[in-house]
Amino acid sequence: KKKKKKKKKREKNPPPPATTAKKVPNRQLHNTVAELLIWSRTSLMSSNKAFAGSYNRILESSSDNISNDSKVKAKRALQCLHTIIRKERKKFNEFARKEGFMLSDLFRQDRDALKYQQIVKGKDGDINKLTKLATKSGATNVLSLITTRFASDPSKITHFESVQSLVQGWVTATELDGDTEVDKEVAKQLKEIQLARLKATIRQLRQAYKRTEREIVLASLDSTVDSHVAALLIAAALGKWEIDTDGDAQMSDADTPVDSVGCNLHLPGGVVHTVDSIKKVCDLLMSIISSDPVIFPSMADSDGSATIKAVVNMVERYLKENQTLLAVSSVDLKLPPESIETLVKRNCSIHRHDVDDIQERLNREGAKNGDITISLSWDTHDDLDLHVFLPTGVEISYANRACVEGKATLDVDMNASSPYSNTPVENVFVGDVDKHEEAPHGKYKVVVQNYGYHAKNATSTTEIPWQVVVNKNGEKEKFTGKCLNTGEASDVVACEFEYTGRTVPYEEKEQSPEAAANTVNITTSVGRTLEALTQAIKAVGQQEQMDEVRQLLNEDESGEQTEERPTLSATYEVTNRDRNNMLIFQLPARFQTIVNKVFGGGELSNQCAETIAKRMVQDKIPISELKRAGYPDDIVESVREKMKVV
């Protein structure tokens, strides 16, 4: 009976027909709703009026009886939300790629989940960070994927951004040694990645060099790792050997003489290396980074900076007629008159590149020099602070910027508030070198402190490298270190010294040899980034053109060369356009100002002067020809100035 009753109950509740069966849930709809709910809870969207308004319109239209009008409004609101989310997601992705932590985050979560397609799409910062993580963790599979990425598409290879990044990121042979098979495989993969990045860096630098007939003499005069590495990269860029050939140098141009294949690199102590293959570059790089450069007392100061004697020695011994000396050095080129005379007679020029850009930063911020000058530099957005303890016990810092009794002032303090700089500098000067005012005698102590981290993802274990330079008695001493943590816990004593008074005479303000363009070509560039090295290489390539311009400008009114240089015979032919140029030059200044205001593009007279200057440099016409063509003195002078910068 019970079975019959159960059977009847089942018959009373038959299964629903197929047309009313429960549908499979729409996964895309669920994901959309979930995404909207997540975004609606973020602080970013809670302050976004457009997002909040559209979100509320969807909620208001979620009643049982939805009209067609409500559906249209809800659909528009949903489209608006999707647009806002898409824009914000794009910003986040750009930020993440810029900071370089997207692939590294995936690696930390699950290193085996990383796919080749993800690594192919990775940005430079992503790949560099991932390489470091994979090396430390011994993840040979990830390193193999990165190597494959570089091998399959050379355009994907990330070059080193600076000398510093190359030195810090280059793993030497000692560090690559390992006993296990995993260690050996990691070393093999990392060598391939390093080599690929090095080749990409050299290719990038070679694109900047415009080859000329002028021969280059390259020297690294400072006994520092950064200087030697910068000079080595420049030597590789100046060479004509094939980058992808790992053996001996080979010709890239069949007509090029054998002696111009490689570039000779002069190092302190008379050591000369011929950089003629990628293998030679790697060997020298390993040697430079793995061992401290030898300091030669006669050629370098205690901090490794070259002396004037080193520069003079290079000029007298190695610089021949019609050559350019490219000296990687931090020394100011205050050459003696006899050396300047030698350069002029030999028709030589000098370009000095300084990898240490602290002086450029000080000049940029308008820092002042004292009898003692103490400067701090670092390369992050974080807020480091310079503390100088005077002999009187007074502490100079951001909290106490000046002490009249101690004759000390903190005149540059950076990264305390936004906008933050990634090339900051701080400066304290004691005494006044311009007024010949000595700093107080006694013991000084210099302390570096990290007031606070501003860099993204920084923690209390993040180290911030810094450099302190103490300039006194005409000599600079460099001290390096790292700050860890913040506040007093991060304090590092950079140096302590006793000052007993000035031992060298104050320098009189004289014209810098770099500014004496009418005497000899001496140019300078500064920086350790790849872009800075590119500018140095471009400057060397432009020396031949600059020499031609100098010849054009160094004629007196009689048309004769004021220096012993080859005479240029071209003449300036006056055209109808030139007549118009003269008329424009003679127009009132007010008229030119009004025309410039209405049409833009600079003053007419300046444009005319630039046009004439370009034509004269291009056709190698001396400046004296302008006067013969009837141009007034003021126009000639204006064109002369333009020719210097064409």
Image (cartoon, rainbow, N blue to C red):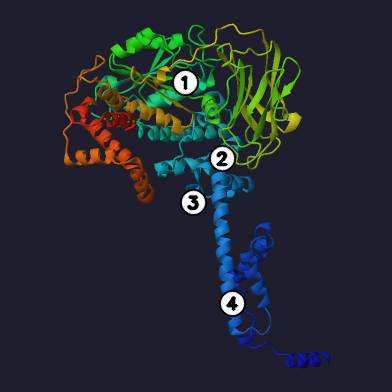
Q: Nearer the viewer, mark 2 or mark 3?
A: 2
Which is more N-terminal, label 3 or label 2?
A: 3
What residue did someone put label 2 on?
Answer: 129
Query: Counting other residues with Cα less than 10 Å from the Cα at mark 4, is it few (<14), some (14-19), or many (20 or more)?
Result: some
> Could you give the CA–CA distance between mark 3 and mark 4, rounded to whole angstroms?
40 Å
Q: Which mark is residue 117?
A: 3
How far across and down, in percent of the image, does residue 492 sit? 70, 24
Q: Position of residue 471 (x, y in %)?
A: 59, 16
Query: Which residue type carries mark 3?
Result: Gln
Q: Which is more N-terminal, label 4 or label 3?
A: 4
**What label sits on residue 228 in the rendered view?**
1
- Residue 464 in picture, x, y percent from top left: 64, 31
Which residue lies under the disc numbered 4?
73
Q: Secondary structure at mark 1?
A: helix
- The local crowd at label 1, few if under 14, some if 14 to 19, many if 20 or more residues have their Cα within 10 Å, is many
In this rendering, the label closer to the viewer, 3 or 1: 1
Q: Is residue 215 left or right of residue 54?
A: left
Q: Disc 4 residue type?
A: Lys
Q: What separation in Å lies between label 4 and label 1 (alpha carbons)?
A: 67 Å
Distance Cα–Cα, label 3 vs label 1: 38 Å
* Callout 3: SS: helix
Q: Residues within 10 Å of mark 3 (few under 14, many from 20)?
A: few
| Among the two numbered marks 4 and 2 on one chain, the one whose residue lies closer to the N terminus | 4
**Is there any visible trace of residue 355 in the rendered image?**
yes
The residue tagged with tag 2: helix, strand or loop?
A: helix
